[in-house]
Every structure is written in C-alpha cells, then in structure tokens.
Amino acid sequence: MVWTYEKESPPSASIWVRTVVGNSGSPRRLTVRMFGSRPRITPTAMLLVIALLVAACGRNVASGELQGVVVDPPQPKPSFTLTDTSGEPYEFAAETEGKLALLYFGYVNCPDICPVHLAQIAEVFDQIPEVARDTEVVFVSVDPDRDSRDEIRAFLDNFDSRFIGLTGTRGELDKAQTEAGVPPAIIEGEGDDYTVDHAGWVIAYAPDGQHHVNYPFGTRQSEWANDLQILAAWNGGSG
C-alpha cells in the first residue's frame, strides 16, 4: 500500500491520498479537504495526518479490547426500511441479522468524511477477507435530491462493490436517522451547490443485534482493523 500527500494553499487546501490495493496495481484515489488559516503543513500536522490516515501494514492482530467509542449500555438495532440501489426494499434489521453491520449516513458529494470512512473500511476488507465475509456495510444517502440509485452505486463501487447503498424520501430518511439515534441531516446553502450537514460517525452493530460502538472521523486504520475483527466474532458477551 502506498500513500502520497500533497498540500495546496487555503481555501482549497487538500491532502490527496493515493493507495494501491491488492495485486491488480489499480490505484484508489480520494481527496481529503482540510480548511484552516495556515498556509502550510507543519511537521506536527503532517504527523497527525499520517497517524489518522496511514494504513496498518503487516499482520492485523486484534488486541481483544475495542478502541472505538463504546456505547454503554448497548442500544438495539433499528428496523427501518429503505430502497437499495437495485430498487428493492431493504429492511435493515432483517437483512443484517446475525452479521456485523456498519451503518453510515452520508452523501455522494461529501468532500471529506464519507470517502475516508469508506476507504478505511474497504482497506480492512482487503487486508482481512474473513471480516468482509461476516460484515454488511450499509451507506444511506441523506441527499435524495441529487443522489440517484445509479450514482450511489457508482460511488460505493469506488471502494467496494459489496457495500450496500440505500435511499428514500426525505421523510423516510429522517425517520431512519432518528431510529438509528443520529440527528437528521440538514441542507446548508442554496441552489444546486449545497452541502449536507450530517452525522459523521459510523455505527457498528455486532451480530447480537446491539449497537456497541461508534467510529468518528479520525478513527485510525489500526483501530478499524482491531475492532472489526472483535465485532465480527461478537457472541453477545465480551467479544
């Protein structure tokens, strides 16, 4: 895996992350935009970026202790129904029963948080295939006016074709977010060039059907690899 970093001057300051995965040699490239008043990256800032984004190398061995934000007490999995990218109804609780389910509310035009989360999860799948076999990643678009089913599918395929994409009416999406315990997304701006203020964390439901952990933006790659192994094998006890 190879990462490269570039920095431009604000306000369009960007860090470009390029990774080569598997044996195909085809790169996955994404942009993380970081805004601020400083016109350059300091050594300390660069170390923080590397700590947040660099992928774990070598063997991925779980520590036995969850490193995400633990939810205590755990909360039950919601049972909302939305529409998948094939146009079929998808009942979240039923479709993910007995599996590790990672639920995330985002949107296709998200400039930073969404692609980083998805790229990190996809990297764990590449590194630890047994985790991928037992996990359902569900991306719910909270931008129904711009994100068609085809656009959601194409977006997710940039990371992993196994990721599930869902959409619905504004009312259905607000209901799903409320049932999952996150604030409904808010449109910011006018016209077509708007952004969406949405929950920035991934919600993890273990195979026991309980919401045990949240993963905010900034979760390290090593933490993802550690926790997904633990959660995939969760038996309703200590993991």
Image: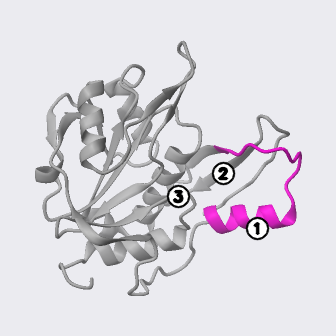
Q: CA distance from mark 1 to mark 2?
A: 15 Å
Report x, y in % for residue 46.
78, 62
Residue 85 appears in view: no
Q: CA distance from mark 3 to mark 1?
A: 23 Å
Q: Is residue 158 above or below residue 228?
A: above
Q: Which mark is residue 21?
A: 3
Which color scheme did the rendering employ for the protein? one colour
Element under disc 1? helix
Q: Is residue 108 above or below residue 178?
A: above
> Mark 1 near mark 2, Cβ–Cβ under 8 Å?
no
Local crowd at mark 1 within 10 Å, few (<14), some, or many (≥20)? few
Q: Which residues are magenta?
A: 32-53
Q: Earlier in the sequence, mark 1 or mark 2?
A: 2
Q: Which mark is residue 47?
A: 1
- In this view, the mark in front (3 or 1): 1
Q: Nearer the viewer, residue 186 or 158?
A: 186
Q: What residue would you read off at disc 2?
A: 17
Q: Nearer the viewer, residue 200 or 48?
A: 200
Q: Which mark is residue 89?
A: none
Report x, y in % for residue 41.
85, 55
**Residue lying at 53% horizontally and 15% vertically, measured from the top left:** 192
- Specify the quadrant of the image occupied by residue 170: top left
Local crowd at mark 2 within 10 Å, few (<14), some, or many (≥20)? some
Q: Nearer the viewer, residue 29 or 78?
A: 78
Element under disc 3? loop
Q: CA distance from mark 2 to mark 3?
A: 13 Å
> Identity of the amino acid at label 2?
Val
Residue 42 included in the magenta stretch of the image: yes
Q: Is residue 141 above or below residue 112?
A: above
**Residue lying at 46% horizontally and 40% vertically, measured from the top left:** 198
> Identity of the amino acid at label 3?
Val
**Residue lying at 33% horizontally and 78% vertically, measured from the top left:** 230
